[in-house]
Image (spheres, grey):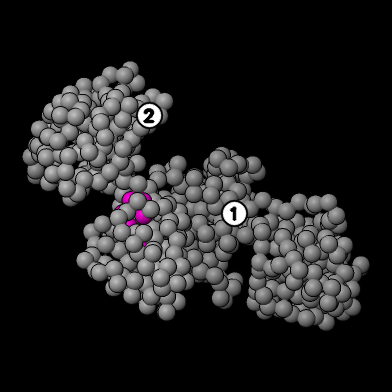
Amino acid sequence: MTARFIGVGPGSADLLTVRATRLIAQCGTCLFEGDSVTPEVLDLCPPAARLVDTTGMPLADVIAEIRSAAQREDRVVRLFPGDSASYPGVFEETRALDAEHIGWQIVPGVPVVAAAAAALGVELTGPHGPGSAFITRVDDPSEPLASITGPASPDLTVVLHVRASHLAEVTRELIPAYGPDCPAGIVVSAGGEGESTVVGTLADIADRMVGTALSTDVVMVVGRILGLRGDDDEPAISREPGPASSPSPGTTPEPTPPSVVPTSARIPAAAPGRILVLGGTGEARRLADLMVAAGLDVVTSLAGKVSRPRLPRGEVLTGGFGGTEGLITWLRAHDVSAVIDATDPFSAEISASAIRAAHETGVPLLRVHRPPWTPEDGDDWIRVADTDAAAQLVRQRFRRPMLTVGRHGPTAFAGDTRGSYLIRCAEPPPGTLPHRYLLVLDRGPFGVESERTIMSRHRIDVLVTRNSGGPASIATLRAARDLRIPIVMVDRPADPHPAGGGPDGAGHLSDTGHLVDTVHSVDDAARWLVRRFGSR
């Protein structure tokens, strides 16, 4: 067992790294420090996970919790605000785990400093500003700051994590070293929903903070970089204010100092409604998992052809909608913002229904198109239009075929009384099968060596498979190539979606005139969602 020390960034779940989101969603025990981790981050934990608030807990008790979780074989995450590598106490705990012979890993997060710099619109160091930045936490404002930061320099930006109650004292301490006219900025709730920035000078920053709601800790940035934020190098404190948030009904808004900019006014607040995924593939599961982790309302529809499917996260519907009209009715009744067709390439009827339903309702439609396989050097492919054509060819030319054509495909070979078949599928196929066969119930992915072994052991003289694409059956194709076994490749049915598309989700008109966006991977689908609905 390896305990993961995860930096959760400034606090918002949409600023978690993808790795952090995945690890939290898979944990069995989660340790966190009270209000430093937001409820929306904790909501990513599985419902059955053990949540332990370690606020005020002695180090020995924290280690005892991790040790107990290890004995239960739980996956353990330890959450810290910002970047866990720079949070006080992390390395004390990792040394204690070393003594217990418990593995650990530090998973970096978005530093609060980075969120503060982004809110202020500045680069802390770089070719267009000061060459150095000094970052520290001020726990004791009575200690002379000059002894911490060193002598003041125009080439230095000072970034301080400060308790709100210490701001006035820290500002007075900085003025003798940096001068009253030195630009200063304060970021409240950096990276969070209530984020706001206050910009001024050391002489007036305290007055500009009047009326601003403060969290426990704030980030203070001091240095000439704040005077270079405009494109024309105009001092930032003289720039026009950004848009202000609308007051709540029934309240009287207080005057907002020109330098106070609520960052929430720059963040689109609209959230997408429900997203329907037409699934049944590995791509559909991964995409649903990502969207659920991002806080989106996702429903995955499965056709119900498999009795024990691998289920994605989120709500799952099984059995379809009863045709195109049923899908149209469901889309209109459930406030659907987008439909993602991530079905198997051989599910042409479902894809055609999705196009017609999207056309009738005006709901955006994205197709996740898994690229087909293409022959490589050494392959001996015989391409056929469908499984009926494959069955006719096999009866004429081969005697020991291996079938990997899905659960319903083997029935096309039922009339063969001469061949000895090896049939592999995830569940028992319905209907009549060939006269002589061995049924193997298994699902990929498979290894090349095991595929070569099974083909050699059963003296396979042809592999019959469908051109589904994807990595799950690559090993099977390679084993056939290595053994010089010909492959009868069943082509995909006529595509109900338009041809083309690319990684940018370029749209094309279907036969119905509806615009269909097409991508070729889960990552491209995620980027399409971000472009359409914004980052979450």
x 30%, y 55%: residue: 88
In the image, 331 versus 90, the foreground residue is 90
Mark 2 surroundings: few (<14), some (14-19) or many (≥20) residues within 10 A: few
Q: Is residue 512 visible?
A: no
Query: Which numbered disc, 1 or 2, marks the residue that appears first in the sequence?
Result: 2
Q: Is residue 57 above or below residue 434?
A: above
Magenta residue span: 76-84
- Is residue 397 visible to us here? yes
Name the residue that disc number 1 marks.
Answer: 352
Residue 532 versus residue 100 in the image, above or below: above
Mark 1 nearby-residue class (10 Å; few <14, some 14–19, many ≥20): some
Instruction: State the mark number for residue 131.
Output: 2
Q: Is residue 457 above or below residue 78?
A: below
The residue furthest right is 397
Left or right of residue 275, residue 305 in this image = right
Residue 236's quadrant in the figure?
top left
- Find residue 100 and report its horizontal and vertical position in percent: 41, 73
Describe the element under mark 2 as helix, strand or loop.
Answer: loop
Picture residue at 26% right of the left edge, 57% below the top: 36
- Amino acid bearing label 2: Gly
How far across and how far down the image is residue 239, in percent? Answer: 24, 23
Q: Marks 1 and 2, Cα distance to the nearest angstrom?
A: 58 Å
Q: Amino acid at mark 1?
A: Ala
